[in-house]
Image (spheres, rainbow, N blue to C red):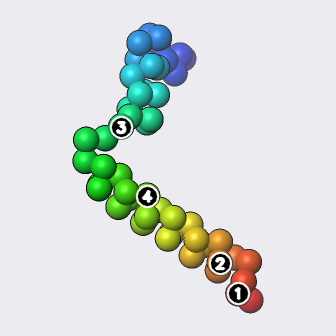
Amino acid sequence: MKWFPQEKQRIDFLGLAMRKEKHTWMEKFYLVIGLLFFGYVFYSLFFTD
């Protein structure tokens, strides 16, 4: 089974993951939420009993 049967599909997938979104505030919002979440997980793993 091929994960990417067409080269164009793979490029589109990478473009989708790396694209510059028109709604930059939404990207920043999700980025901040992600950083807060992973920061909390990191803190809870290493700095709590």
Q: Type of residue at label 3?
A: Lys
If you read the primary sequence from the N terminus, does the residue marked by circle 4 or circle 1 appear first?
4
In-image side of 16 versus 36 (left or right): left
Q: Which quarter of the picture shows residue 25?
A: bottom left
Residue farthest along the left direction in this orientation: 23
Q: Which of marks 4 and 1 is in front?
A: 4
Give the distance between the C-alpha atoms of the residues marked 4 and 2, in whole angstroms: 18 Å
Mark 2: few/some/many CA within 10 Å (<14, 14-19, 20+): few
Residue closer to the observer: 29 or 46: 29
Q: Type of residue at label 2?
A: Tyr
Q: Type of residue at label 4?
A: Leu
Residue farthest along the bottom direction in this orientation: 49
Q: Quick check: marks 4 and 2 in contact, CB under 8 Å?
A: no
Mark 4: few/some/many CA within 10 Å (<14, 14-19, 20+): few
Q: Please name the residue that numbered disc 1 is placed on.
A: 48
Q: Please name the residue that numbered disc 3 is placed on.
A: 20
Q: Callout 3: helix, strand or loop? A: loop
The image quadrant where one finds the C terminus is bottom right
Q: Callout 2: helix, strand or loop? A: helix
Q: Quick check: marks 2 and 1 in contact, CB under 8 Å?
A: yes
